[in-house]
């Protein structure tokens, strides 16, 4: 970690994230839809499938992260890294999910933010199982009690849990596998949705 002008920054080459709390990663993901508005949503029962999201660059202000679990319809508890970001932008975003159908597996693909306007999100919480990319953190605090995280209002975890946060984050070549996302606002300029036979995931 280096110090520049009084601002602490950390630069890490991330190849794989699998619920190992190394110095933190921000998460961003996308729902099928152009804009969702409201407060940070409560936890919900997740589907049986994950979805993938990629972006050339993710930039964010106000990042928190801690460990937790999500639950599917069968009552199975799934460990996840809960990551939140107060304000985020994603350039050249892609989201895919594989869907079983009577004609075989099809890929539901969404792209947005491919022009001059990036995808933007506010007050977002994501349950992720894997993240990759080149990350830079500003004012990183690792090992903070999850209940005392304060970079994202309403983004605290359980007392006694390991937590980490940063005032800002940038991730290049962003790749993520996640189970769910809640966001107060999610805007996707240039949204395109396609259903393609076979498996054609973002990465």
Image: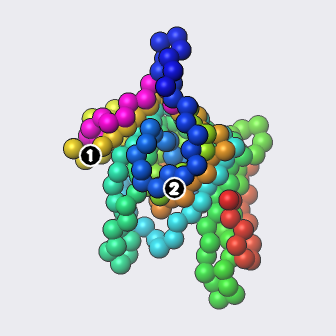
Q: Nearer the viewer, residue 185 or 72?
A: 72
x and y percent of residue 130 in the render?
51, 55
Q: Quadrant of the C terminus?
A: bottom right
Magenta run includes residue 140: yes
x and y percent of residue 116 in the render?
76, 37
Q: Nearer the viewer, residue 111 or 186?
A: 111
Q: Callout 2: 10 Å neighbours few (<14), some, many (20+)?
A: some
Q: Secondary structure at mark 1?
A: loop
**Main structural element of the magenta stretch: helix, strand or loop?**
strand
Q: Secondary structure at mark 2?
A: strand
Taking the spot 51% from the left edge, 71% from the top edge, the residue there is 49
Image quadrant in which you'd find residue 24: top left
The image shows residue 78, relative to residue 10, as above or below, that is: below
Image quadrant in which you'd find residue 162: top left
CB under 8 Å between discs 1 and 2: no
Q: Is residue 13 left or right of residue 200?
A: left
Taking the spot 40% from the left edge, 39% from the top edge, the residue there is 64
Check the image and name the residue furthest to the right.
115
Q: Which residues are magenta?
A: 137-147
x and y percent of residue 47 in the render?
46, 71
Magenta run includes residue 70: no
x and y percent of residue 201 in the render?
68, 64
The image shows residue 76, relative to residue 142, as above or below, that is: below
Q: Is residue 164 left or right of residue 91?
A: left
The image's mark for residue 130 is 2
Taking the spot 61% from the left edge, 67% from the top edge, the residue there is 97
Q: Is residue 115 left or right of residue 161?
A: right
Check the image and name the residue furthest to the bottom.
102
Sequence-earlier tag: 1 or 2: 2
Q: Which residue is mark 1?
A: 161
Q: Callout 1: 10 Å neighbours few (<14), some, many (20+)?
A: some
């Amino acid at each position: 970690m280096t110090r520049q002008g009084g601002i602490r920054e950390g630069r890490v080459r991330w190849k794989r994230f699998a619920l190992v709390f190394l110095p933190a990663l921000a998460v961003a993901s996308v729902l099928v839809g152009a804009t969702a508005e409201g407060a940070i949503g409560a936890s919900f029962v997740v589907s049986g499938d994950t979805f993938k999201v990629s972006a050339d660059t993710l930039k964010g202000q106000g990042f928190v992260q801690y460990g937790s679990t999500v639950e599917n319809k069968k009552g199975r508890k799934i460990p996840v890294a809960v990551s939140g970001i107060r304000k985020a932008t994603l350039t050249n975003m892609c989201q895919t999910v594989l869907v079983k159908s009577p004609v075989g597996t099809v890929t539901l693909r969404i792209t947005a933010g491919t022009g001059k306007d990036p995808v933007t999100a506010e007050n977002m919480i994501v349950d992720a199982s894997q993240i990759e990319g080149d990350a830079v953190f500003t004012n990183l605090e690792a090992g903070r009690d999850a209940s005392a995280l304060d970079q994202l209002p309403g983004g605290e975890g359980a007392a006694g849990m390991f937590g980490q946060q940063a005032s800002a984050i940038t991730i290049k070549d962003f790749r993520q596998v996640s189970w769910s996302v809640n966001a107060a606002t999610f805007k996707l300029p240039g949204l395109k949705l396609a259903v393609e036979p076979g498996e054609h995931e973002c990465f």
